[in-house]
Image (cartoon, rainbow, N blue to C red):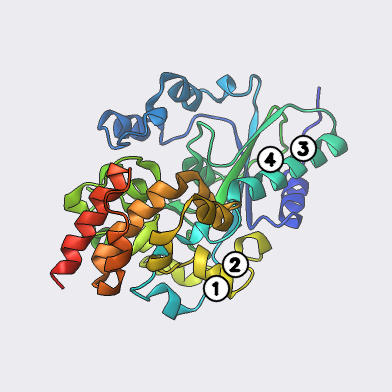
Amino acid sequence: MLSRLLRTVVTEKALSLGFSLVGVVRAEPSPMLRAYERWIAADMHADMAYMARADRVARRRDLNVILPGVQSMIVVGLDYRASVPDDILHDPSRGRIAAYAWGVDYHAVLMEKLNTLAGWIEREHGILKHRAYVDTGAILERSHAHSAGLGFIGKNTMLIHPRRGSQFFLGEILTDADFDTYDTPATPTTMCGRCTRCMQACPTEAFPEPHILDARRCISYWTIENKGAIPPELRARFGSWIYGCDICQDVCPFQRFTPITREPAFVPSNMHNVMHTVAPFLSDVLAWDEAAFDSRYAHSPIRRIKRERLIRNACVAAGNSRDTRLIPALESLLGEANPLLDDHARWALERLSAV
Protein backbone atom coordinates (compact mmCIF):
# COMPACT_ATOMS: atom_id res chain seq x y z
CA MET A 1 0.00 0.00 0.00
CA LEU A 2 1.28 3.47 -0.87
CA SER A 3 2.27 5.70 1.99
CA ARG A 4 0.36 8.94 2.20
CA LEU A 5 1.67 11.76 0.06
CA LEU A 6 2.61 15.01 1.72
CA ARG A 7 0.30 17.69 0.35
CA THR A 8 2.80 20.48 1.04
CA VAL A 9 5.59 18.70 -0.87
CA VAL A 10 3.39 18.05 -3.91
CA THR A 11 2.12 21.62 -3.80
CA GLU A 12 5.67 22.99 -3.74
CA LYS A 13 6.62 20.83 -6.70
CA ALA A 14 3.59 21.98 -8.68
CA LEU A 15 4.43 25.62 -8.01
CA SER A 16 8.03 25.01 -9.07
CA LEU A 17 6.73 23.77 -12.44
CA GLY A 18 5.12 27.15 -13.02
CA PHE A 19 1.56 26.61 -11.87
CA SER A 20 0.00 29.68 -10.27
CA LEU A 21 -2.40 27.87 -7.93
CA VAL A 22 -2.53 24.37 -6.46
CA GLY A 23 -5.01 22.51 -4.27
CA VAL A 24 -5.69 18.88 -3.33
CA VAL A 25 -9.13 17.46 -2.56
CA ARG A 26 -10.71 14.08 -2.08
CA ALA A 27 -12.08 12.60 -5.31
CA GLU A 28 -15.74 13.03 -4.48
CA PRO A 29 -18.68 14.12 -6.63
CA SER A 30 -18.94 17.86 -7.18
CA PRO A 31 -21.23 19.67 -4.74
CA MET A 32 -22.65 21.43 -7.82
CA LEU A 33 -23.59 18.20 -9.61
CA ARG A 34 -27.34 18.68 -9.16
CA ALA A 35 -27.15 22.23 -10.48
CA TYR A 36 -25.29 20.93 -13.53
CA GLU A 37 -27.96 18.29 -14.15
CA ARG A 38 -30.69 20.94 -13.92
CA TRP A 39 -28.74 23.07 -16.43
CA ILE A 40 -28.58 20.15 -18.86
CA ALA A 41 -32.29 19.42 -18.36
CA ALA A 42 -33.06 23.05 -19.30
CA ASP A 43 -31.15 22.59 -22.62
CA MET A 44 -28.82 25.47 -21.77
CA HIS A 45 -25.90 23.48 -23.18
CA ALA A 46 -27.26 24.24 -26.68
CA ASP A 47 -26.06 21.63 -29.20
CA MET A 48 -23.03 20.53 -27.14
CA ALA A 49 -24.58 17.08 -26.88
CA TYR A 50 -21.41 15.56 -25.43
CA MET A 51 -22.09 17.42 -22.17
CA ALA A 52 -25.32 15.47 -21.66
CA ARG A 53 -24.12 12.05 -22.78
CA ALA A 54 -25.04 9.33 -20.29
CA ASP A 55 -21.47 8.08 -19.96
CA ARG A 56 -20.15 11.55 -19.20
CA VAL A 57 -22.89 12.23 -16.65
CA ALA A 58 -21.99 8.92 -15.00
CA ARG A 59 -18.35 10.00 -14.72
CA ARG A 60 -19.32 13.25 -13.05
CA ARG A 61 -21.47 11.37 -10.56
CA ASP A 62 -18.70 8.90 -9.69
CA LEU A 63 -15.03 9.64 -10.46
CA ASN A 64 -14.28 5.92 -10.01
CA VAL A 65 -15.78 5.44 -13.46
CA ILE A 66 -12.86 7.49 -14.80
CA LEU A 67 -10.17 5.93 -12.60
CA PRO A 68 -11.10 2.87 -10.52
CA GLY A 69 -9.83 3.26 -6.97
CA VAL A 70 -9.39 7.02 -7.27
CA GLN A 71 -8.76 8.71 -3.93
CA SER A 72 -7.60 12.24 -4.64
CA MET A 73 -7.65 15.08 -7.12
CA ILE A 74 -4.83 17.58 -7.58
CA VAL A 75 -6.23 20.80 -9.05
CA VAL A 76 -3.95 23.43 -10.56
CA GLY A 77 -4.35 26.88 -12.08
CA LEU A 78 -2.08 28.67 -14.56
CA ASP A 79 -2.40 32.40 -15.32
CA TYR A 80 -2.78 33.25 -19.01
CA ARG A 81 -3.30 37.01 -19.33
CA ALA A 82 -0.62 38.70 -21.44
CA SER A 83 0.08 42.44 -21.71
CA VAL A 84 -0.82 44.01 -25.06
CA PRO A 85 -1.38 47.61 -26.17
CA ASP A 86 -4.88 48.87 -25.38
CA ASP A 87 -5.27 50.59 -28.73
CA ILE A 88 -5.02 47.23 -30.51
CA LEU A 89 -7.85 45.77 -28.43
CA HIS A 90 -10.20 48.66 -29.17
CA ASP A 91 -9.45 49.22 -32.86
CA PRO A 92 -12.80 48.70 -34.69
CA SER A 93 -10.99 47.52 -37.82
CA ARG A 94 -9.72 44.48 -35.91
CA GLY A 95 -11.42 41.32 -34.72
CA ARG A 96 -11.20 40.54 -31.00
CA ILE A 97 -9.91 37.20 -29.74
CA ALA A 98 -10.45 36.02 -26.16
CA ALA A 99 -7.30 36.39 -24.06
CA TYR A 100 -7.01 32.67 -23.33
CA ALA A 101 -6.24 32.05 -27.02
CA TRP A 102 -3.47 34.63 -27.46
CA GLY A 103 -0.69 32.10 -27.01
CA VAL A 104 0.13 28.47 -27.69
CA ASP A 105 -2.68 25.94 -27.25
CA TYR A 106 -3.09 25.66 -23.49
CA HIS A 107 -4.08 21.99 -23.60
CA ALA A 108 -0.55 20.99 -24.62
CA VAL A 109 1.15 23.41 -22.21
CA LEU A 110 -0.78 22.33 -19.12
CA MET A 111 -0.77 18.65 -20.01
CA GLU A 112 3.02 18.62 -20.26
CA LYS A 113 3.30 20.19 -16.81
CA LEU A 114 0.69 17.82 -15.34
CA ASN A 115 2.47 14.76 -16.76
CA THR A 116 5.77 16.07 -15.38
CA LEU A 117 4.18 16.44 -11.95
CA ALA A 118 2.63 12.96 -12.08
CA GLY A 119 5.91 11.48 -13.25
CA TRP A 120 7.75 13.13 -10.36
CA ILE A 121 5.24 11.72 -7.87
CA GLU A 122 5.75 8.24 -9.36
CA ARG A 123 9.53 8.43 -9.13
CA GLU A 124 9.61 9.94 -5.64
CA HIS A 125 6.76 8.07 -3.99
CA GLY A 126 6.26 4.83 -5.86
CA ILE A 127 3.91 3.57 -8.55
CA LEU A 128 0.46 5.09 -8.63
CA LYS A 129 -2.38 5.23 -11.09
CA HIS A 130 -3.44 8.60 -12.44
CA ARG A 131 -5.37 10.41 -15.16
CA ALA A 132 -4.66 14.02 -16.12
CA TYR A 133 -7.17 16.36 -17.71
CA VAL A 134 -7.13 19.84 -19.18
CA ASP A 135 -10.61 21.03 -20.08
CA THR A 136 -11.50 17.72 -21.74
CA GLY A 137 -12.58 15.27 -19.05
CA ALA A 138 -16.06 14.79 -17.66
CA ILE A 139 -15.17 16.75 -14.54
CA LEU A 140 -16.91 19.82 -13.12
CA GLU A 141 -13.52 21.41 -12.68
CA ARG A 142 -14.56 24.86 -11.45
CA SER A 143 -16.54 23.31 -8.64
CA HIS A 144 -13.67 21.03 -7.63
CA ALA A 145 -11.28 23.99 -7.88
CA HIS A 146 -13.48 25.93 -5.44
CA SER A 147 -13.40 22.96 -3.07
CA ALA A 148 -9.60 22.98 -3.37
CA GLY A 149 -9.40 26.63 -2.34
CA LEU A 150 -8.58 28.10 -5.76
CA GLY A 151 -11.41 30.65 -5.77
CA PHE A 152 -15.16 31.19 -5.73
CA ILE A 153 -17.83 30.91 -8.41
CA GLY A 154 -18.86 34.27 -9.86
CA LYS A 155 -22.26 35.26 -11.15
CA ASN A 156 -20.67 34.93 -14.60
CA THR A 157 -20.06 31.21 -13.73
CA MET A 158 -16.27 31.76 -13.81
CA LEU A 159 -13.94 30.62 -11.05
CA ILE A 160 -12.59 33.83 -9.51
CA HIS A 161 -9.64 34.06 -7.18
CA PRO A 162 -10.14 37.09 -4.90
CA ARG A 163 -6.53 38.21 -5.46
CA ARG A 164 -5.96 36.96 -9.03
CA GLY A 165 -9.22 37.45 -10.94
CA SER A 166 -10.44 34.70 -13.26
CA GLN A 167 -8.01 34.56 -16.15
CA PHE A 168 -6.27 31.29 -15.38
CA PHE A 169 -6.56 27.80 -16.84
CA LEU A 170 -7.46 24.76 -14.76
CA GLY A 171 -6.04 21.25 -14.90
CA GLU A 172 -6.50 18.13 -12.80
CA ILE A 173 -4.72 14.93 -11.87
CA LEU A 174 -6.93 12.12 -10.60
CA THR A 175 -4.93 9.57 -8.61
CA ASP A 176 -5.38 6.54 -6.42
CA ALA A 177 -2.84 8.02 -3.98
CA ASP A 178 -3.97 9.25 -0.58
CA PHE A 179 -2.70 12.50 1.00
CA ASP A 180 -1.86 13.35 4.57
CA THR A 181 -4.15 16.39 4.48
CA TYR A 182 -6.59 17.96 2.03
CA ASP A 183 -7.47 21.52 1.15
CA THR A 184 -10.81 23.12 1.89
CA PRO A 185 -12.57 26.10 0.31
CA ALA A 186 -10.72 29.33 1.10
CA THR A 187 -13.74 31.45 0.20
CA PRO A 188 -17.53 31.20 0.31
CA THR A 189 -19.12 29.63 -2.77
CA THR A 190 -19.46 33.17 -4.10
CA MET A 191 -18.14 36.60 -3.11
CA CYS A 192 -20.04 38.67 -5.67
CA GLY A 193 -22.36 40.30 -3.16
CA ARG A 194 -24.83 42.61 -4.89
CA CYS A 195 -22.60 43.19 -7.91
CA THR A 196 -24.18 42.31 -11.26
CA ARG A 197 -21.73 44.03 -13.63
CA CYS A 198 -21.10 40.86 -15.62
CA MET A 199 -24.79 40.21 -16.14
CA GLN A 200 -25.50 43.81 -17.13
CA ALA A 201 -22.52 44.00 -19.50
CA CYS A 202 -23.33 40.85 -21.48
CA PRO A 203 -24.59 42.15 -24.84
CA THR A 204 -26.57 38.99 -25.60
CA GLU A 205 -28.14 38.64 -22.12
CA ALA A 206 -26.66 35.18 -21.68
CA PHE A 207 -27.16 35.14 -17.89
CA PRO A 208 -30.85 34.50 -17.13
CA GLU A 209 -30.01 34.60 -13.44
CA PRO A 210 -26.86 34.76 -11.30
CA HIS A 211 -24.48 31.81 -11.69
CA ILE A 212 -26.32 30.43 -14.73
CA LEU A 213 -25.04 30.80 -18.28
CA ASP A 214 -27.34 30.00 -21.18
CA ALA A 215 -24.99 28.86 -23.94
CA ARG A 216 -27.73 29.49 -26.49
CA ARG A 217 -27.08 33.22 -26.05
CA CYS A 218 -23.33 33.21 -25.38
CA ILE A 219 -20.88 34.82 -27.82
CA SER A 220 -18.19 32.30 -26.91
CA TYR A 221 -20.50 29.41 -27.69
CA TRP A 222 -21.57 30.81 -31.05
CA THR A 223 -18.09 31.81 -32.20
CA ILE A 224 -16.33 28.62 -31.07
CA GLU A 225 -18.57 25.63 -30.43
CA ASN A 226 -21.35 26.13 -32.95
CA LYS A 227 -20.61 24.94 -36.47
CA GLY A 228 -23.61 26.43 -38.23
CA ALA A 229 -25.17 29.83 -38.78
CA ILE A 230 -25.17 32.43 -36.03
CA PRO A 231 -28.77 33.54 -35.37
CA PRO A 232 -29.38 36.82 -37.23
CA GLU A 233 -31.08 38.34 -34.19
CA LEU A 234 -27.86 37.96 -32.17
CA ARG A 235 -25.25 39.00 -34.73
CA ALA A 236 -25.50 42.74 -34.18
CA ARG A 237 -24.72 42.19 -30.48
CA PHE A 238 -21.40 40.44 -31.09
CA GLY A 239 -19.40 43.60 -31.64
CA SER A 240 -15.92 42.77 -32.92
CA TRP A 241 -15.49 39.37 -31.23
CA ILE A 242 -14.35 36.70 -33.69
CA TYR A 243 -13.18 34.02 -31.23
CA GLY A 244 -14.68 33.83 -27.77
CA CYS A 245 -15.51 36.78 -25.54
CA ASP A 246 -14.02 38.31 -22.38
CA ILE A 247 -16.70 40.89 -21.55
CA CYS A 248 -18.10 39.22 -18.43
CA GLN A 249 -14.58 38.81 -17.07
CA ASP A 250 -13.23 42.21 -18.06
CA VAL A 251 -15.95 44.11 -16.18
CA CYS A 252 -15.55 42.09 -12.98
CA PRO A 253 -14.08 44.20 -10.12
CA PHE A 254 -11.79 41.31 -9.17
CA GLN A 255 -10.08 41.56 -12.57
CA ARG A 256 -8.08 44.52 -11.33
CA PHE A 257 -5.93 41.97 -9.50
CA THR A 258 -5.27 39.83 -12.58
CA PRO A 259 -1.51 39.21 -12.86
CA ILE A 260 0.39 39.10 -16.13
CA THR A 261 1.31 35.50 -16.88
CA ARG A 262 4.85 34.29 -16.39
CA GLU A 263 4.29 31.41 -18.83
CA PRO A 264 6.16 32.25 -22.07
CA ALA A 265 3.88 30.02 -24.17
CA PHE A 266 0.93 32.34 -23.50
CA VAL A 267 2.71 35.55 -24.48
CA PRO A 268 2.71 36.60 -28.17
CA SER A 269 6.40 36.56 -29.05
CA ASN A 270 6.43 39.76 -31.13
CA MET A 271 4.18 42.45 -32.52
CA HIS A 272 3.62 40.44 -35.71
CA ASN A 273 2.09 37.66 -33.62
CA VAL A 274 0.04 40.18 -31.66
CA MET A 275 -1.53 41.30 -34.91
CA HIS A 276 -2.78 37.78 -35.63
CA THR A 277 -3.43 36.23 -32.22
CA VAL A 278 -4.86 39.15 -30.24
CA ALA A 279 -6.76 41.31 -32.71
CA PRO A 280 -6.08 40.66 -36.42
CA PHE A 281 -7.30 43.10 -39.04
CA LEU A 282 -10.70 41.96 -40.30
CA SER A 283 -9.63 42.69 -43.87
CA ASP A 284 -6.84 40.13 -43.46
CA VAL A 285 -9.02 37.45 -41.88
CA LEU A 286 -11.67 37.74 -44.59
CA ALA A 287 -9.02 37.14 -47.25
CA TRP A 288 -7.27 34.13 -45.68
CA ASP A 289 -7.32 30.84 -47.55
CA GLU A 290 -6.77 27.48 -45.85
CA ALA A 291 -2.98 27.71 -46.09
CA ALA A 292 -2.88 31.21 -44.58
CA PHE A 293 -5.16 30.18 -41.72
CA ASP A 294 -3.13 27.06 -40.98
CA SER A 295 0.19 28.89 -41.00
CA ARG A 296 -1.03 31.50 -38.51
CA TYR A 297 -2.83 29.21 -36.08
CA ALA A 298 -0.93 25.92 -36.32
CA HIS A 299 -0.16 25.92 -32.57
CA SER A 300 -3.13 27.98 -31.36
CA PRO A 301 -6.43 26.85 -29.84
CA ILE A 302 -8.03 28.89 -32.65
CA ARG A 303 -7.03 26.14 -35.04
CA ARG A 304 -9.78 23.87 -33.73
CA ILE A 305 -12.58 25.96 -35.26
CA LYS A 306 -10.96 25.92 -38.71
CA ARG A 307 -10.99 28.65 -41.34
CA GLU A 308 -14.70 28.55 -42.19
CA ARG A 309 -15.92 29.39 -38.71
CA LEU A 310 -13.32 32.10 -38.15
CA ILE A 311 -14.29 33.83 -41.40
CA ARG A 312 -17.98 33.41 -40.54
CA ASN A 313 -17.27 35.22 -37.28
CA ALA A 314 -15.20 37.87 -39.06
CA CYS A 315 -18.14 38.59 -41.38
CA VAL A 316 -20.30 39.36 -38.34
CA ALA A 317 -17.61 41.58 -36.85
CA ALA A 318 -17.23 43.35 -40.21
CA GLY A 319 -20.95 44.03 -40.31
CA ASN A 320 -20.74 45.56 -36.86
CA SER A 321 -17.61 47.61 -37.61
CA ARG A 322 -19.22 50.42 -39.65
CA ASP A 323 -16.03 50.21 -41.75
CA THR A 324 -17.09 50.43 -45.40
CA ARG A 325 -13.53 49.65 -46.48
CA LEU A 326 -14.38 46.02 -45.73
CA ILE A 327 -17.04 45.86 -48.44
CA PRO A 328 -14.70 44.50 -51.18
CA ALA A 329 -13.43 41.73 -48.90
CA LEU A 330 -17.00 40.74 -48.04
CA GLU A 331 -18.09 40.85 -51.67
CA SER A 332 -15.30 38.43 -52.54
CA LEU A 333 -17.03 35.84 -50.34
CA LEU A 334 -20.32 36.05 -52.22
CA GLY A 335 -21.03 33.10 -54.42
CA GLU A 336 -18.26 31.10 -52.77
CA ALA A 337 -19.16 27.43 -52.75
CA ASN A 338 -19.99 27.85 -49.11
CA PRO A 339 -23.53 28.90 -48.20
CA LEU A 340 -22.52 29.61 -44.58
CA LEU A 341 -19.99 32.29 -45.57
CA ASP A 342 -22.26 33.64 -48.29
CA ASP A 343 -25.07 34.13 -45.77
CA HIS A 344 -22.92 35.93 -43.21
CA ALA A 345 -21.17 38.07 -45.81
CA ARG A 346 -24.53 39.21 -47.21
CA TRP A 347 -25.72 40.10 -43.72
CA ALA A 348 -22.59 42.18 -43.16
CA LEU A 349 -22.92 43.94 -46.49
CA GLU A 350 -26.51 44.89 -45.68
CA ARG A 351 -25.33 46.37 -42.39
CA LEU A 352 -22.54 48.35 -44.03
CA SER A 353 -24.79 49.60 -46.82
CA ALA A 354 -26.75 51.51 -44.17
CA VAL A 355 -23.69 53.31 -42.85
Establish if 99 lies above or below 272.
Answer: above
Q: Please tell me which residue is depicted at 77% across the width and 28% down the height of the picture.
A: 128
Q: Residues within 10 Å of mark 4 (few under 14, many from 20)?
A: some
- Mark closer to the chain start, 4 or 3: 3
Q: Which residue is mark 4?
A: 181
Asked whether, in this view, residue 295 is left or right of residue 29, the answer is right
Contact check, label 4 and label 3, Cβ < 8 Å: no
Name the amino acid, label 2: Pro
Disc 3 marks a residue whose amino acid type is Leu
For residue 5, which numbered disc appears in the image?
3
Q: Nearer the viewer, mark 2 or mark 3?
A: 2
Is residue 231 among the parts visible in the rendering? yes
- Tag 2 near tag 3, CB within 8 Å: no
User: What residue type is disc 4 on?
Assistant: Thr
Q: CA distance from mark 4 to mark 2?
A: 39 Å
Q: How dense is the environment of label 1, judged by Cα within 10 Å: few (below 14), some, or many (20 and up)?
A: few
Lower position in the chain sequence, tag 1 or tag 2: 1
Disc 2 is placed on an element classified as loop
Q: What separation in Å lies between label 1 and label 2 (alpha carbons)?
A: 9 Å
User: At which x and y percent is residue 309?
Assistant: 38, 48
State the SS at label 3.
Answer: loop
4 vs 1, front mark: 1
Mark sitting on residue 83:
1
- Mark sitting earlier along the chain (4/1): 1
Task: Give left or right: position of 128 versus 157.
Answer: right
Please name the residue that numbered disc 2 is placed on: 268
72 versus 243 height, above or below: above
Q: Amino acid at mark 1?
A: Ser
